[in-house]
Amino acid sequence: MHIAILTFDGYNELDSLIALGVLNRIKTDDWRVTIATPSPKVTSMNGVVVEQMSTLEEACAADAVIVGSGIATREVVETPAIMEVLRGLDPSRQLIGAQCSGALVLARLGLLDDIPACTDLTTRPWVVAAGIEVLNQPFYARDNIATAGGCLSSQYLAAWIITRLQGSAAAEDALHYVAPVGEKEEYVDRARRNITPYLPAPTQVRS
């Protein structure tokens, strides 16, 4: 099971790395989480350099994908070499999530047609200009596409993916582990409230 987090130059560390940390609470031999980049290294908005763990082409073949956010997303969607590869993303066979400005990428790929989205306040006007309804909430999903708005909502995207692939108990265990001491139940309950309305009923575990 491969989960790829698309991460570009100018990426927001909270978006890519929180999701990476939560997703990696799953400790099974067939569970693999990677940072997928268009180049061997990318540098964050605050100067943090990470090395490529998988390519964009490999991400398009992954079981689940999170499109990360960053300060250069508008440049990303205007880069034909990147967008042509990302046209290989397919919600009929993949879970696809977008964090903050990652929603703009999904919009430009045509994956949000008739689907409302969540995004951050800075990106909101650009997503609206792309013809997408933007919701005032942290998380929304329809079928195999999900979006989250606000850096710390990345935990919801991670939990949604774990729930869909491993079940709700695994997602709650992962969130319980990373949540602050003394607030663990509160964090898990909040995530459950945000995610559950958008899960298949009953929750399906993909094989």
Image: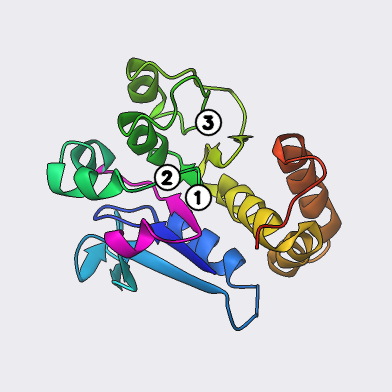
Give the class, few, some or many, for how many residues have Cα within 10 Å of label 3's Cα (few <14, many ≥20): many
The CA distance from mark 1 to mark 3 is 22 Å
User: For this view, does 156 lie left or right of residue 201?
Assistant: left
Question: What amino acid is at disc 3?
Answer: Cys
User: For this view, does 189 lie left or right of residue 102?
Assistant: right
Circles 2 and 3: CB distance less than 8 Å? no
Q: Secondary structure at mark 2?
A: loop
Image quadrant occupied by the N terminus? bottom right
The residue sitting at the bottom extreme is 29
The CA distance from mark 2 to mark 3 is 20 Å
Image quadrant occupied by the C terminus? bottom right
Give the class, few, some or many, for how many residues have Cα within 10 Å of label 1's Cα (few <14, many ≥20): few
Circles 1 and 2: CB distance less than 8 Å? yes
Q: Residue at x 49, y 19 (%)?
A: 114
Relative image position of residue 157 (x, y in whole percent): 58, 49
Residue bearing the label numbered 1: 93
Q: Residue at x 37, y 60 (%)?
A: 59
In the image shown, does 47 or 78 lie closer to the viewer? 78
User: For this view, does 188 lie left or right of residue 153?
Assistant: right
Give the class, few, some or many, for how many residues have Cα within 10 Å of label 2's Cα (few <14, many ≥20): some
Residue bearing the label numbered 3: 118
Going from N to C along the chain, the mark reached first, 2 or 3, is: 2
Q: Which residues are magenta?
A: 56-72
Question: What amino acid is at disc 2?
Answer: Asp
Relative image position of residue 50 (x, y in whole percent): 31, 71
Going from N to C along the chain, the mark reached first, 1 or 3, is: 1
Residue bearing the label numbered 2: 90
